[in-house]
Image: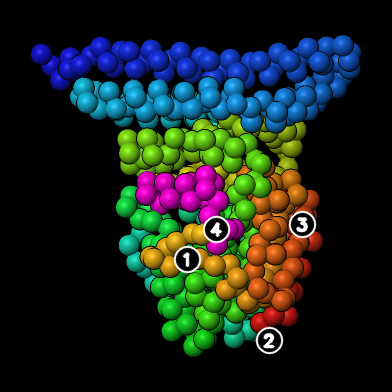
Amino acid sequence: MTVYDLDTFSVVESTQKVMLSAMRLAGEYWKIYAKAYSKLYPLGYFDKMYDNWLAIIDGELDKHLRSEEFIKTLNEYVENCIGLYDAMERSGYPVAIIHELIDSYLRAMMLFSNVPVKPFATPHHIAHAKDDTRLLRYHSSPQYKIPLLIVYAPINRYHIMDLNEDKSIVKRFISGGFDTFLLDWGEQTNNNLTIADYVNYIDESIEEIKTLTGAHKVNLFGYCWGGVLSVIYASSHSEKVKNLLLQAAPIDFDKDNSVLAEWTRKFPIDKYVDTFKEMDARILNLGFLMRSPARYAFDKYVKFTQKIDDPKFVDNFIRVERWLYDTPDIPGEFFRQFIKDLYQKNLLIQNKMVLNGKTINLKRIEMPLLSIVGSKDDLAHPASSAPLMDAVSSKDKQLIEFPLGHVGLCVSSSAHANLWPQVVKWLQEHSQ
């Protein structure tokens, strides 16, 4: 008897369950497409059919993907996948097959994710390294004594902050006169890391920056989940933070009504992490695509072909594509805690989150605060970021709402022309 004969029935049964639940999940999308077409046909605007179809799809997706029916179908699919993985592992089947299947699907959806581009990075060196993390220090001639630490989101790579010569948030701060550092989380291979460990990495980075620069405090800038970690850090180490800047950082998770947040609140996180030990990057990428397959796996490539003769547009597009699908695996215990304590229990805004035996109280944040949100953000809804303004004790606080989405805040021409000069000016005025 070969290793593949062990408990074969359970593998077959689990495979059938996954296939059937996958078909049901696909059927949920086809319900949306069919309803959109039925609403489109009477209009008769055949010259605008494509745009009308997409607009109707958006509306139907927004309603249906939040419904109990869809979320039940999605979770059934997830749990059957967990069951299949477990059965294959127990039976000696090569579980890498599952990853290969997902990879092949994603590669078909992400046409430009492996297209090579000329490397770009603002000149820097590694100032400090610990485990998988690196503290990058960008080369500059600083005019301000208070250095800046950028804390990126662990859920992606930091390169979107430094996309190219024209679209680099890092360069905005350097040009503004700041000694700029960035915390790169690296490959995050330790699945036992918790939120407290990530906060400790921030603290070690800040201590290193203080040693290198002679500063007593730093300016702390957190993006998305990195913003959440920065808020937690500023609450527990307020004496080390001069100014706190946040970009697209969800804080009141009950008010995040994005599709991913709705799914996450019902996600079987314990079963998932207990089985897979980490949040696989492929699953994250698949989740991002599932918010709107028509938009993210089709329409954006249609728009790409319309501007294919614009070299700058093509370069930006491919760089963003490569970044979107270069997601690292997320340590299981960190992911479990983040999902349960924040998305599912919403402890942070209630001042009930506990790390290392200490309660995180947002009222301890007293330093000047600038929060940047995108009014079109469908990953971190602005309504989930705004409540921080009332939860902190800061007297000097400002919320900037800009008419872009989550990624657009980083890479759009309008953001770099109109938003980031405001942000840099604010920091300059508060770093005297």
Magenta segment range?
330-351
Q: Which of 144 and 154 is in front in this view?
A: 154
Determine the secondary structure under disc 3. strand
Label 1 or label 3, whichever comes before in sequence order: 1
Q: Quadrant of residue 379?
A: top right
Disc 4/disc 3 C-alpha distance (Å): 22 Å
Q: In which quarter of the image is residue 130?
A: bottom left
Determine the secondary structure under disc 4. loop
Mark 1 touches mark 2? (CB < 8 Å): no
Front label number (4 vs 2): 4
Q: In which quarter of the image is residue 54?
A: top right
How crowded pointer 3 is (Cα within 10 Å; few <14, some 14-19, many 20+) is rated as: some
The vertical placement of 147 against 26, above or below, is: below
Q: Mark 2 points at which residue?
A: 432
* Residue 277 visible in image: yes
Residue 401, label in figure: 3
How crowded pointer 2 is (Cα within 10 Å; few <14, some 14-19, many 20+) is rated as: few
Q: Is residue 94 left or right of residue 79?
A: left
The vertical placement of 45 against 108, above or below, is: above
Query: Which amino acid type is marked by label 3?
Result: Glu
Disc 1/disc 2 C-alpha distance (Å): 32 Å
Query: Which amino acid type is marked by label 4?
Result: Leu
Front label number (2 vs 3): 3
Q: Mark 1 points at which residue?
A: 359
Disc 4/disc 2 C-alpha distance (Å): 31 Å
The percent coordinates of residue 398 (x first, y second) are 74, 68
The percent coordinates of residue 332 (x first, y second) are 37, 46
Q: Name the residue under label 4.
A: 348
| Residue at image point 55% right, 51% down | 346
Query: Which quadrant would the N terminus be assigned to in this image?
Result: top left
